[in-house]
Image: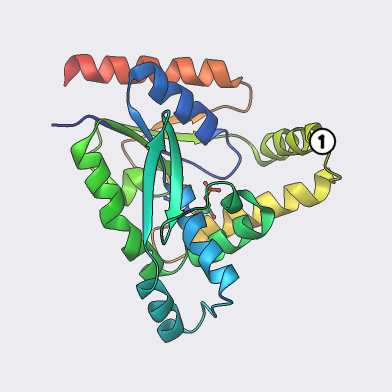
Amino acid sequence: MSFNIAIDGPAGAGKSTVARKAAKELGFIYVDTGAMYRTIALYMLREHVNIEDEEELARALDRISVSLRYRDGIQHMFLNGEDVSSQIRTPEVSAKASLTSAKAAVRAKLINLQKDLAARENVLMDGRDIGTCILPDAQLKIFLTASVDERARRRYLELKEKGEDCDLASIREEIALRDYRDSHRESAPLKQAGDAVLLDTSDMDADEAVRRVVELARERMRVS
Ligand code: DC
């Protein structure tokens, strides 16, 4: 049987960095489920699909095939056979993914892909509903979070480093809005699973968070 680790938490908490490094250390496959929602959102943007129209959304979903492949241990996303791994990282796609991922039909399309991966391999999967919906029997669940101010500060520094012109107050506002949307939607809202370990990284650097995740995983692997 495979060993599954679920890491959930809000945007900008450092989940993907921590999850990727911890997976590498543990020899697990890292599955970034946000990238799957982003891939669908990219299609909706490109094709100008009105996602509020259920029939139009359902027709669009029928035309999409989402798959993933690993190259040198890095997850690449494919949309109808095209590698869209870099196109899905724009702010437009982030905003659209927050809206499209709230749709039950969109979530239904990705559930089997996520569950099948976890059934076959030892995975460390990150997202919003992994511990609560996708892998309710995961051997380890972690809810990784940080305060809104700290997440905004990290994002601000990241963008500044890339030379982008940005403003801390609007980044903070955007993060707070995404949190609200992700945790108030009807379909699989972001929430901590009852049996998840809470890891608040507000005063922790990424390496410390990775160490903690790896420690927790090794403890659980010993007892299971
Ligand atoms: O983690 P991220 O920013 O790449 O996620 C993109 C969007 O997808 C975000 O708005 C939350 C949503 N998402 C989700 O609803 N469920 C998941 N398991 C992963 C991401």
Q: Is residue 51 above or below residue 189?
A: below
Is 40 situated left or right of 160 in this image? left
Q: Residue at x 82, y 35 (%)?
A: 160
Q: Amino acid at mark 1?
A: Lys
Q: Is residue 27 above or below residue 180?
A: above
Residue behind mark 1: 160
Secondary structure beneath label 1: helix
Q: Is residue 104 above or below residue 16?
A: below
Identify the residue at the far front of this view. 81
Is 102 situated left or right of 68 in this image? right
In front of the other: 74 or 11: 74
In terms of image quadrants, where is residue 122? top left
Q: Is residue 143 above or below residue 116?
A: above
Identify the residue at the far left of this view. 1
In front of the other: 47 or 11: 47
Can residue 49 be seen in this snapshot? yes
